[in-house]
Image: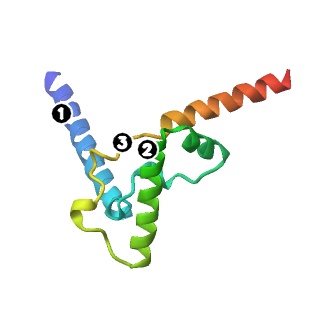
Amino acid sequence: MASVGSRAASKLSLGQKVSAAFREWYIYACGYRQIGLKREDLIIEDSDVAEAVRRIPEEERNLRNFRIVRAIDTTMKMKWLPEELWTKPSEDVPYLDPVIQKVKAERKERELWDKQ
């Protein structure tokens, strides 16, 4: 019985490894890190996202705008950035998602309040 559990655990571990490897390959294949962007720089700006961008600190907003402008310039030149300027996985952390979730929750609360 113990061997069955350990085999299932090793299969799960292998599946997790394969999933992680595929995820890293897919992120690389998307190419946004090679032009200096973070994942959240790619979010389409609807009203909630625009409000979230407005709420993040000015320094983070300026960095975001710089990354986007640099990515546009790099794309227009049809070149990747030098590898030392690529966004590293450790740098590609959520900075906008928590604010977007808060904005959406506030909007839903406002809508519920307006219905009453």
Please give the name of the residue rendered at 34% of the width and 47% of the height, measured from the top-left corner.
Answer: 92
As helix, strand or loop, the secondary structure at mark 1 comes to: helix
Mark 3 or 2: the one toward you: 2
Packing grade of label 3 (10 A; few <14, some 14-19, many >=20) is few
**Residue type at mark 3?**
Val
Dots 3, 2 in contact, CB < 8 A: no
Of labels 1 and 3, earlier in sequence is: 1
Name the image quarter holding the N terminus: top left
Q: CA distance from mark 2 to mark 1?
A: 50 Å
Residue 80 in the image: x percent, y percent?
31, 71
- Write down the residue under mark 3: 93
Packing grade of label 1 (10 A; few <14, some 14-19, many >=20) is few
- Write down the residue under mark 2: 59
- Write down the residue under mark 1: 7
Packing grade of label 2 (10 A; few <14, some 14-19, many >=20) is few
Please give the name of the residue rendered at 58% of the width and 42% of the height, measured from the top-left corner.
Answer: 54
Closest to the observer, 71 or 39: 71
